[in-house]
Amino acid sequence: MSTEPQFLSFKGLKQYTPEEGWGQVNAILQSHAQHSGVQQPSQPQATQQHYQAQHPAVPDNVPTLTETPDAGHESAAVFDPLINELFEQLRVPPSDELTQTWRTIAAEVNLLTERMALQRELQERLQKLDQELLNLRSTILTHLADVQQAADQQLTSARLRAEVSALAQTKLSAKLASKR
């Protein structure tokens, strides 16, 4: 079996095991390499012993995620031949046209979001303006009613003064005419 790490050999990559919690993937690779005879960079002895006690050696006929099948090897039948192609496709960056299309879509979504926020703000402002207009109309109608009432009172007072003045004129004329 080939011991070349594929995609899980990145330094700092962690793996979760229920017994130990999160652990370094490099420790797993080192343990596997020690069992298969490949020398890896040394690790503190206590950690290696603890790991080996917790994780027994993996049998040689069980494929791992960090190994690639050898051509003609008996474990090659276990792997799906499309997996390598899938990983290759994942490593290849997307085409510029596709990337540009997604960037255009993202920019348009951002613009749409901005416009929708502006629309909401304008609708709120329009509602406030409509309310202000209703309040102004109501205030104007109240003032017009007050003016009409004051004008009616003035008219009533003017009529009363005119009547009183006419009556006083009539009485005064009659009194002055009788004294002659």
Image: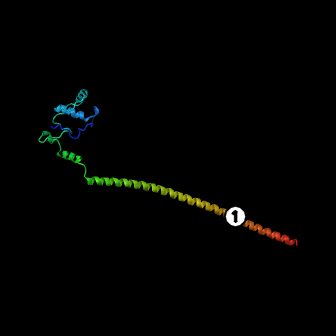
> Looking at the image, which residue sits at the far top?
46
Instruction: Name the spot of residue 68 as percent of width and height, x first.
Output: 17, 40
Label 1: which secondary element:
helix
Taking the spot 26% from the left edge, 34% from the top edge, the residue there is 24
Q: Residue at x 64, y 60 (%)?
A: 146
* Vertical relation: 118 (above or below) 90: below
Residue 175 lies, with reference to residue 65, above or below; the image says below
Q: Badge 1 local density, few (<14 within 10 Å), some, or many (20+)?
A: few
- The quadrant the C terminus occupies is bottom right
Q: Residue furthest right?
A: 180
Left or right of 97: which side holds 71? Answer: left
Residue 82 image position (x, y, % from top left): 18, 46
Report the quarter where the N terminus lies: top left
- Expressed as whole percent of the image width and height from the top left, the position of residue 23 reads 27, 34
Going by the numbered disc 1, the residue's amino acid type is: Gln
Q: Residue at left 55%, top 58%?
A: 135
Q: Say which residue label 1 marks.
A: 154
Between 31 and 130, which is closer to the camera in this rendering?
Answer: 31
Residue 70, picture quadrant: top left
The residue positioned 70% from the left and 65% from the top of the image is: 156
Front residue of 40/174: it is: 40
